[in-house]
Image (spheres, rainbow, N blue to C red):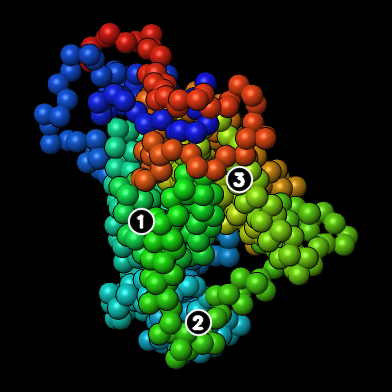
Amino acid sequence: MPSAETTPARVREPETVRPTREDEIAAAGSELIGGPLGRRALTGTSWWTPVRVVVFVAIGMFALGLVQKAPCYDGAWFFGASSQYTHACYSDIPHLYQGRGFADGLVPYFDKLPGDMDYLEYPVLTGVFMEVASWLTPGSGGIQHQEQWYWFVNAGMLMVCAAVIAVCVSRTHRRRPWDGLLLALAPAFALTATINWDLLAVALTAAAMLMWSRGRAVAFGVLLGLATAAKLYPLVLLGPLLVLCWRAGKWREFFQAVGGAAGAWLVVNVPVMLFAFEGWSKFYTFSHDRGIDFGSFWLIWSQNSSNPPSIDFVNTTASALVVLSFLGIAALTFTAPRRPRFAQLAFLMVAAFILTNKVYSPQYVLWLVPLAVLARPKWRDFLIWQACEVAYFLGIWFYLAYTTSGDAHKGLPTEGYHWAIALHLLGTLYLCAVVVRDILRPERDVVRRAGDDDPSGGVLDGAADHFVLRGLRHPEQEAPEEPSRTDWGGPEPLPHEGRSL
């Protein structure tokens, strides 16, 4: 049993982990390209490095996601109330080109919009992204032509974000670049990539995780602050980092990260806050005031109750649930037999934030995919979760087709949609449960089983523990008098080992 005083570092020489040697599904899937890598195969002699392969595959899958949107690009966004839903190709991007004033040259946050939404309801950095895309959109032709171009320009910019995410995820765990294929091949990632602008925040968060893994706390903080200026969710990563640095005694690095995050966020937000406060604050007031929306368990409750919960009740309860989730993660961190990996807690915290929220939009899966790859790089569990998310992706569009097709009711009725919500919530909870099990039983963690400690942990990787709740630990988990390093062993060989390509 490992020491409670020391989280051991790996003792073997760095060597790329081959997923076909430790994962049965990866080994079976490799038969499509010639089978698992043999023991005598020459590695490191080709231009096609693992990271380049992952990026190439990610761009290819992204392109397939664009093809999936072709029916909408050709007309479903513009004609017919439900055709964009029956083809499952809806996107906010073309609709908001005119709806948020970009077609008329209005400046986000400064110029008031006509209609129900008086200002742009997105954080500042996302608003800048949207504005830059509008500058690159040709202003000639009809409005439909301009909206098509606006979506296409945004898709190109979001593809760059997807490539950045693929690079960062593949490089965060130095010895496990091939885990990036989980992200690159994730069907829900490709299907939801151009629904909204979430990939900007996801790319910045992935880059922040890479910087932390390299021990660059200030760079991590700056990138996380920029990510929070694009979407609110990256902020919750500071919670897991707090308890991990507490257990390891790495307060200097934690405060460097917090300072970098605060500074970057202020640099982006203060200019708009000072000169257009009403427009700047719209994101926060809208987030508070918006009603119960798609994908959440709150919607199931609301639509099945004669006395649905009020917005104030939902806001208060959801906030309380997030706080309770953080306290649970803190307790898990301080009592676990071995300090949890940063990616594990980051995934759990973001998942808790989404699961308790009053809206769980289909593109929110993008927030979780990179963290899931780093937290639990196991093909079986990842694909189970992805299957649930793809089912929900289809379920929400067919439900909207049902509600917008009039008396024809073409699509999925309300009861069916509730089952789709339940399925994707359960899929996320399943992956959370597996990650928690890995924390409580570190020998089940595939990353640590390959001989690593916390490759995404930066200064936490192999660091000694300074604070542990001993009273809640099993006696067998207490530290010996002289802490020793532990080799957690390599993966069990699979039946195919020894075969050549």
Quick check: marks 3 and 2 in contact, CB under 8 Å? no
Q: CA distance from mark 1 to mark 2?
A: 28 Å
Residue hosting label 2: 280
> Do the numbered discs 3 and 1 sit on residues whose CB atoms are within 8 Å?
no
Kindly identify the amino acid type of the residue bearing the numbered disc 3. Answer: Ile
- Of mark 1 and mark 2, the one earlier in the sequence is 1
Which quadrant of the figure has residue 308? Answer: bottom right
Quadrant for the C terminus in the image: top left
Secondary structure under the numbered disc 1 in the rendered image? helix
Left or right of 98 on screen, residue 29: left
Residue matched to label 3: 329
Q: Nearer the viewer, residue 64 or 323?
A: 323
The reply to whether residue 66 is visible in this rendering is: no
**Circle 2: residue type:** Trp
How far from the left and from the top, in percent, is residue 351? 57, 48
Q: Residue at x 62, y 39 (%)?
A: 469
What residue is shown with label 1?
217
